Amino acid sequence: MSTQAVVPAPDPRNAPIITTPRTVLFATEQVSPPTNLYVTQEDQLRVMALGTTGLLLSVIMRMLLPNGLIVPIERDLPPQTNYTTQINTYPLPEGFLLDCIVTVAGTGVARGQAYALVQIVRGPANALIPMHTIIADYVSSGVGACFPNGQIRAVNEGPGWFNVNPITPPGPGGQWGGGLGANTRLRLRAVYAILTTSAAVANRLVFLNIYTQPAGYYICSIPASIPQPASTAWVYSWFAGAPQVAPVASGIICPLPIDLTLGPTAVITSAVLAMQAGDQWSAITVTGEQLFDSF
């Protein structure tokens, strides 16, 4: 009786590898660095930062040294002081700057609360010359400003910090108001307030006034659609693009100019014609997109 021979399976370790030949070849020796930003021993790193009080910013980078080593460098900036520019300058080793990022510590830091300008500079300490701007943008929690591939934005550009600012109510018979403060720019979105009138008989007509100080040039003066009578509590809402409509359930809606941007000298106030001594403002808020104005 004959038996059929069993052919052993080929060893997969010896199986030929069949692939499509490459049409592009890459050099593996004496290749150009992956960046065109070369830093010399005469260059320094200058970091200009703005932030709300207490924010902690850090600059982290990697450099390719002439000996081929890639070294990380980190610089922690001093805590930020409200709306005050901080300038720090650091020495750099010679080599190629591969990448750089500015981050802010903690959570809950919104865009518009911290800004960083990072430059390569050279020259004497009292007359440094910017040679290259590598980062110029706002920094927020989880989203740093980076080089390369980051955007270069001025301090008064880009989306800002959407912030609701409460205004301290005045005493009875008084008007409310306030300025933006130093180094602040605001894209005004809405103003909200409640006026409760006393029993004194009079028709109060409410205005929202926006002007500059100290010159007192008016930007706009926006009246309510109708006067408010005695012994009532009306809610006033001014917001961008709103139509001027008749009051609804003791609510007054008034328009604001669309994309109205105010600088640090702007003042927002109420003005009430025929206001009585017992009339009282309350629950006052100014809402807008807040940015820094300049360095």
Image (cartoon, helix red, strand yellow):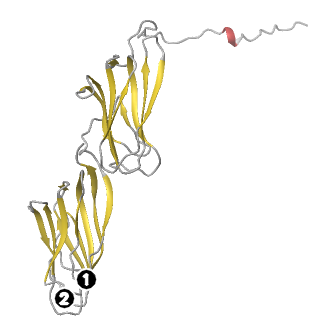
Could you tell whether 183 is left or right of 2 in the image?
Answer: left
As displayed, is residue 164 above or below residue 84? Answer: below
As displayed, is residue 125 above or below residue 282? Answer: above
* Residue designated by label 2: 229
Task: Give the image quarter of residue 217.
Answer: bottom left
Residue at position x 28%, y 55% from top? 289
Q: Nearer the viewer, residue 142 or 20?
A: 142
Look at discs 2 and 1 and give the one toward the viewer.
1
| CA neighbours of label 2 inside 10 A, class few (<14), some (14 to 19), many (20+) | some
* Residue designated by label 1: 172
Quarter of the image where the C terminus is located = top left
Quarter of the image where the N terminus is located = top right
Residue at position x 26%, y 39% from top? 153
Q: Position of residue 184 (x, y in %)?
A: 25, 53
| The disc label shown at residue 30, or none | none
Task: Give the image quarter of residue 90.
Answer: top left
Q: Position of residue 52 (x, y in %)?
A: 35, 50
Residue at position x 88%, y 6% from top? 2
Amino acid at pointer 2:
Pro
As displayed, is residue 159 above or below residue 288? Answer: above
Residue at position x 31%, y 18% from top? 42
Q: Nearer the viewer, residue 119 or 191?
A: 119
- Disc with the residue nearer the chain's start (2 vs 1): 1
Using the numbered discs, state the Cα–Cα distance from disc 2 to disc 1 in whole angstroms: 16 Å
Amino acid at pointer 1:
Pro
Task: Give the image quarter of residue 89.
Answer: top left
Q: Which element type, helix, strand or loop, lies under badge 1? A: loop
Could you tell whether 39 is left or right of 260 in the image?
Answer: right
